[in-house]
Image (cartoon, coloured by chain):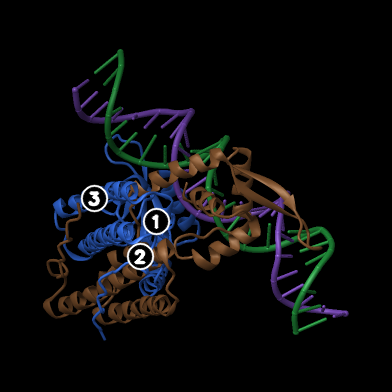
Chain colours: A brown, B blue, C purple, D green
Amino acid sequence: MERELLLLGLLRHEDMHGYRLVELIERDLSTCADVKKPTAYFLLAKLAKAGLIARSRSREGKRPPKWVYRLTAEGEAAFQRLLRQNLEAHLPAKFGGDIGLAFLEALGVEEAAEHLLRRRDAIAGALEGFRAAPEHAGSLGLVLAHQRLHLESELRWIDSVLTWLRGSGRAGISPKLPGIPHHTPNEAS
Amino acid sequence: MERELLLLGLLRHEDMHGYRLVELIERDLSTCADVKKPTAYFLLAKLAKAGLIARSRSREGKRPPKWVYRLTAEGEAAFQRLLRQNLEAHLPAKFGGDIGLAFLEALGVEEAAEHLLRRRDAIAGALEGFRAAPEHAGSLGLVLAHQRLHLESELRWIDSVLTWLRGSGRAGISPKLPGIPHHTPNEAS
DNA sequence: TTTTCCATGTAACTCGTTACATGATTTC
DNA sequence: GAAATCATGTAACGAGTTACATGGAAAA
């Protein structure tokens, strides 16, 4: 449902045609969504058939005519519903990188560390990209900030795995548990 | 490729039949992977055809016979390759929950906060579950620790969004950027 | 003039899921 | 005797992707 929410939300504050929509998502929202062109066109057709958006043909200059979509009243209602649903839910994230970690023991300490350092570099690189990016204002800035925060968390995580790994190399096969700094989350309510 | 790595890795340290494999994944690795039965059977057939695993029929007592899979030499090689590849790569995570955040402005401050608090509760609940769970040793404990760490990070994130929200409610429409505590990651190399 | 960009779409394919089918066996 | 569990599979479907097809317009 996230993709529908996304399309409705974008059309909500500006009428647009499909191509533009995809462009916008790829430029500004690539961190939290990727919607390829055929998917977008398909979803737009579906939403139109459901009556949540309406389309009208328009041409500018001598360019090929395009379908400009606008939100209908039903679309606005659906948007409101989907937004609330999205905000109040927590969709647990699965980290594919963890299944490699689950088999860390198959590698020697040295080699495991070597590969994890490469992963660390990749994360650090991605983080650099985010820090370099211009600061968007408002809720768009929010998603950027979240991604940045997450990457910082991942970096700390990898570091703690590395120290655990090295400790385990000295101590024997596998110690109790990674000694991870344990922040108590502050209450907010 | 993560699923293949998972199956090979599990078969590496114990010969097993499909049903058992799925059971094991659902019990111990549900946090970082989910593999349904038909998927598992399909993948096992594929891996067998590729020569990475070999199967042999066996029956215990009067139960229906089962296919017991074991890793071949090629399978071990593939495992080693996939493991390294997995460890050194960073696969960027997409948070579907962020697209709701991108449209936060569509809701009043009060209502947005209300819904986000529900999300917060969901995260806190999941976290509780992880803290209550028995501490697995070794690399299995790693993936649990990662998930716990991530949930803690998410909790802090939601809290900072909430404080930002409330600040924005007083100050006007939308301020510069969320004032997020900015930890400098410690170097590790 | 050839390439790139704008703009829309279709077709084939992959991956994964649900739902169903089968059959024996333990448990209630 | 009915229900749950063990064990394997097939069929139908859904969502999304890649690759392809089509054209005109602007840029190189």
Place residue B72 in its image quadrant. bottom left
> Do discs 2 and 1 belong to a common subunit?
no
Mark 3 belongs to chain:
B
Mark 1 belongs to chain:
B
Kind of residue sitting beneath label 2: His
Place residue B6 in its image quadrant. bottom left
> Do discs 2 and 3 belong to a common subunit?
no
- Tell me which label, 3 or 1, sits earlier in the chain: 1
Kind of residue sitting beneath label 3: Ala
| Residue B130 in picture, x, y percent from top left | 19, 53
Residue A177: image tag: none
Decide: is A163 above or below C28. Answer: below
- What is the crowding at mark 1: few (fewer than 14 residues within 10 Å), some, or many (at least 20)? many
Decide: is A141 above or below B88. Answer: above
Kind of residue sitting beneath label 1: Leu
Residue B101: image tag: 1
The residue that label 3 is drawn on is B126
| Residue A116 in picture, x, y percent from top left | 32, 77
Residue at image position (48%, 44%) is: A79
**Disc 3 to disc 1, C-alpha distance:** 20 Å
- Mark nearest the camera among 3 and 1 is 1
- What is the crowding at mark 2: few (fewer than 14 residues within 10 Å), some, or many (at least 20)? many
The residue that label 2 is drawn on is A146
**Disc 2 to disc 3, C-alpha distance:** 19 Å
Left/right of residue A88 with respect to residue B126 in the rendered view: right
**Disc 2 to disc 1, C-alpha distance:** 10 Å
User: Callout 2: helix, strand or loop?
Assistant: helix
Q: In this view of the protein, which residue sits in the foreground, A127 or B1?
A: A127
- Does residue B93 appear anywhere in the picture? no
User: Callout 1: helix, strand or loop?
Assistant: helix
| Residue A180 in picture, x, y percent from top left | 17, 69
- What is the crowding at mark 3: few (fewer than 14 residues within 10 Å), some, or many (at least 20)? some
